[in-house]
Image (spheres, helix red, strand yellow):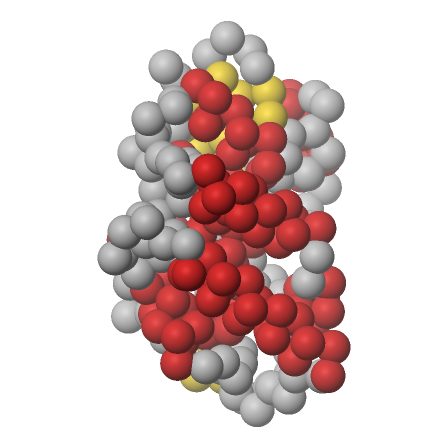
Amino acid sequence: MTYDILIGDRSYSSWSLRGWLLFAAFDIPVSIHLNEMYVPAFAETLKDWIPARTVPVARAADGALWTDSLAIAEGLAERHPTAGHWPSEPRARALARSLAAEMHSGFGALRGACPMNLRVQWRGFEPSQKVRADLARVETLWAHARSLAVTDGPWLFGTYSAADAFFAPVAMRIAGYALPMGDAARAYVDAHLSHAPLRAWRAEGEAADRTLGNYDMGLPTAPFPMA
């Protein structure tokens, strides 16, 4: 089965990263089409992916189009039921879907204050109380997921699932802004930093060497903590 996915700039597009991981982390081949952000051609390119208005967008060989990362997750889980997008245990599966949905619609303070940027680590960032509240909620959710883990792996439910793909950009924000987290949450962030598909994604972004000025935080920088 052949798929195509339209993504934004790898270094910055958190939603594109989620959508792509739903293929790459589950060994589902996909052809990648890059739509550079903040240029006039962005909207023009989307005309070939109607009714999409944003990235990521995924298309199957039969013409089915998923214009949202949650739709991509459910569409691939439906077509590849043995790939492992959702945990097999019912309670874990219910929580994994709930976590993905909350990530999809929540954490506005964290997203707004800490845009994903895989090119640098910002030094001296001071999270607001609202950002700290989002981080506390993240830690609560991650700990609850670990309590339902069905294997001993490093991921939320032991084995990598779509919930991990949805939280990958959060882990990258925590690493990129050196945000305060407890030891268990930090270990989970480190698992993402070592995840081969995510490392390949970042390497492609670095190879493109495209820096978007509107992501500049005006703070001192250090290398992003992914060698």
- Picture coordinates of residue 103, whole percent (x, y): 62, 53
Report the residue at 55% width, 69% height from top: 140
Report the residue at 73% width, 83% height from top: 129
Q: Is residue 206 left or right of residue 154?
A: right
From the viewer's side, name the closer residue of 109 and 90: 90
- Picture coordinates of residue 47, whole percent (x, y): 70, 24
Q: Could you tell me which quadrant the N terminus lies in?
A: top left
Q: Is residue 142 positioned above or below 70 on the image? A: below
**In this view, which residue lies farthest toward the top?**
62
**In this view, which residue lies farthest toward the bottom?**
124
Image quadrant assignment for residue 188: bottom left
From the viewer's side, name the closer residue of 219 and 86: 86
- Picture coordinates of residue 175, whole percent (x, y): 46, 74
Image quadrant assignment for residue 25: top left
Q: Is residue 34 visible?
A: no
Report the label total.
0
Report the residue at 71% width, 50% height from top: 105
Q: Is residue 25 visible?
A: yes
Report the residue at 50% width, 30% height from top: 5
From the viewer's side, name the closer residue of 139 and 218: 139
From the viewer's side, name the closer residue of 21 and 33: 21
Q: Is residue 55 left or right of residue 20?
A: right
Q: Is residue 19 positioned above or below 128 on the image? A: above
Q: Is residue 125 positioned above or below 111 on the image? A: below
- Picture coordinates of residue 32, whole percent (x, y): 44, 33
Q: Could you tell me which quadrant the C terminus lies in?
A: bottom left
